Image (cartoon, helix red, strand yellow):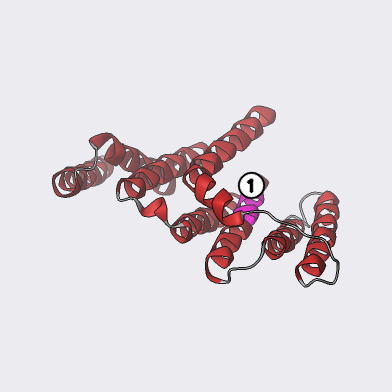
Amino acid sequence: MNSTNNRFFIGIFLLLFGLALLLKQLFNISMWISLLVMLGVGFLISYFKKTHKNSQLIVGLIFLFWGIYEILSHFNLFANLVQVALLIMAISIVLYIVYFITDKSVFVFPASILLSISIVLIANEYLRLDSAAICALLFSLLGVSFLIIYLLELEKTNHKWALYVMAISWVLALFLWLVSYKVINIDINIDIDTILTNLGPAIVPTILIVLGVIILLKSLKSK
């Protein structure tokens, strides 16, 4: 590593460490939380500036999102499901960006599904749909997600199974829309608000766990 790179990384370290101390003094945010963000940023800088190793990109994103999640939790920002939805949407967008950078299929699956979940959470907060309509919207968007997966991966691998999942999702969505509009007289009583309120704090950690497991299984399979 030459002197220019040394100065660059020392400068980044001092900047991030200073910000960590500032957050500690102003908002009483634990140093270990700031360390997570520092590690994430460090791995990402190393990826884009030098190595271009996918493993560093993945680890950097995990540390960064973990740190951001802890910081937001510190300010009790997950009391509102819309804020949870916006964070999930941000994770989805980042995964799409990583997918287009690395051209790895493993990122497009969670990116598409997480985007659907975030839209449903926001719709439930502002549109106040009934239980059947919320479930119908979820299956509709999941169908769109699998269509996106199929189209993005069309030239590389055979993902016809995505079309089957899309079709099943849309059939279920159609049935639920008909129930919601009373065309089919079936009473579906699911307390969506209570479920989302109880599960809200666990959504983001669960997403990170699932993403980690998927990435680990994918890396083990490629060896």
Regarding residue 53, the answer to whether it shows in the image is no
Which residue is denoted by mark 1 in the rendering?
104
Q: Quadrant of residue 25?
A: top left
Q: Is residue 146 above or below residue 182?
A: above
Give 164 or 121, whichever is nearer the viewer.
121
Give 208 or 17, whichever is nearer the viewer.
208
Task: Please report the residue visible at 75 percent of the width from the left and 68 percent of the height from the top.
Answer: 180
Locate residue 217 relative to residue 56 in the image: left or right. right
Q: Amino acid at mark 1?
A: Lys
- The local secondary structure at tag 1 comes to loop
Q: Residue furthest left?
A: 25
Mark 1 residue crowding within 10 angstroms, few (<14) / some (14–19) / many (20+): few
- Give the magenta range: 107-114
Q: Main secondary structure of the magenta part?
A: helix
Q: Position of residue 172 (x, y in %)?
A: 82, 58
Q: Position of residue 126 (x, y in %)?
A: 53, 70
Locate residue 117 relative to residue 87 in the image: left or right. right
Locate residue 119 relative to residue 51 in the image: left or right. right
Regarding residue 96, the answer to whether it shows in the image is yes
Task: Please report the residue visible at 55 percent of the width from the left and 43 percent of the height from the top.
Answer: 207
Locate residue 161 relative to residue 81 in the image: left or right. right
Q: Position of residue 67 (x, y in %)?
A: 36, 43
Q: Is residue 178 above or below residue 193?
A: below
Q: Position of residue 36 (x, y in %)?
A: 34, 38
Q: Is residue 97 above or below residue 57?
A: below
Q: Is 186 colored magenta in this rendering?
A: no
Give 131 or 163, whichever is nearer the viewer.
131
Counting every numbered tag in the picture gives 1
The image quadrant where one finds the N terminus is top left
Q: Is residue 69 above or below residue 119?
A: above
Q: Is 113 colored magenta in this rendering?
A: yes
The image quadrant where one finds the C terminus is top right
